[in-house]
Image: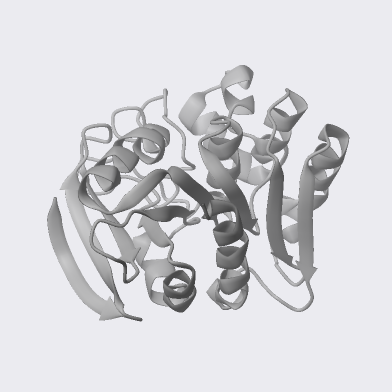
Amino acid sequence: METVSLSRAHGGAQGVYRHDSRVTGTPMTFSVFVPAHEEGERLPVLWFLSGLTCTHANVTDKGEYRAACAREKVILVAPDTSPRGEGVADADAWDMGQGAGFYVDATQAPWAPHFAMWSYVTQELPALVAEHFPVDMERQGITGHSMGGHGALTVALRHPGRYRSVSAFAPIVAPTQVPWGKALDAYLGDDRTAQRRHDAVALIGDGARLPDLLVDQGDADPFLAEQLRPALLEAACRDAGIALTLRMQPGYDHGYTFVSTFMADHLAWHAARLRG
């Protein structure tokens, strides 16, 4: 593992790291903020999955999470959104290909050789982080923005008991019911069973459960009506008895000004469930 950069922030350390991924077959970059802590102390970890067109750098540069992480003593890890580089398949559309991995393991050409973001964020990266950083893997939370919110929800729903806390910012909650679901068609083909396993609303309908969930959504988000459709998640959680806190935030759009505004709230939500 190579250290790309390391800086001090709020008494802790913000690092960016690169390693050769076994599952994607490419170099992968991720960031980690480690708050100040006692020698030998293990801290809870929050995974942040980013959205379409993003890298680890978007939340690292614009997420405004470090002060809250330092206060709550929570490590934050932010991976990239897809494999990248020469020989990695891409698309002309901004919402497909590099930068748009959708946190699935692709089974279809030309994506299958490298697009294994599900295995990366659920297996390989956690093992690497556990080896090199002072994390308590018994105290994990997960969150994400947009496509990353989709990833956070589906990862948590399919790994019951792994994550003590789950939240999302403007998540894609039902990709099989919206235009962005074309990515699942491309990556997974017409296997509807496989697609349902990467759709939070479908997973809940099929019996997956979370104890509770926090979602923030801007009501001025241009993707709200066509792509995000939080009412579908609200209905699914109501029918399943999942305690959803859905906060419609007046005047907020889809960008990192929105995410950063409510980041401290999400950190406090996670910290309350990760203590002890």
Residue closest to the eye, 132 or 169: 132
Residue in view at x 32 percent, y 65 percent = 34
Q: Where is residue 59 in the image (x, y as percent from the top left)?
A: 43, 67
Identify the image's colour scheme: rainbow, by chain, secondary structure or one colour: one colour
> Does residue 158 sit above or below 143 in this rendering?
above
124 relative to 191, above or below: below
Identify which residue, 62 or 72, lies in the foreground: 72
Query: Can I make out residue 145 in this image?
Result: no
> x and y percent of residue 166 in the render?
60, 49
Give percent across and percent down for residue 42: 34, 53
At 34% from the left and 51% from the top, the residue drawn is 135
Q: In which quarter of the image is residue 174?
A: top right
State the residue at coordinates (42%, 23%). 107
**In the shown orientation, is residue 145 left or right of residue 111?**
right
Is 274 in front, or is 220?
A: 274
**What residue is shown at x 39% (from left), y 60% (from top)?**
75
Picture quadrant where residue 14 is located: bottom left
In the image, is residue 58 above or below residue 124?
below
Count of numbered circles on the image: 0
> In the rendering, at what x and y percent does residue 60 appear?
38, 69
Left or right relative to 227: residue 275: left
Q: Is residue 175 left or right of residue 114?
A: right
Residue 194 in sight in this render: yes
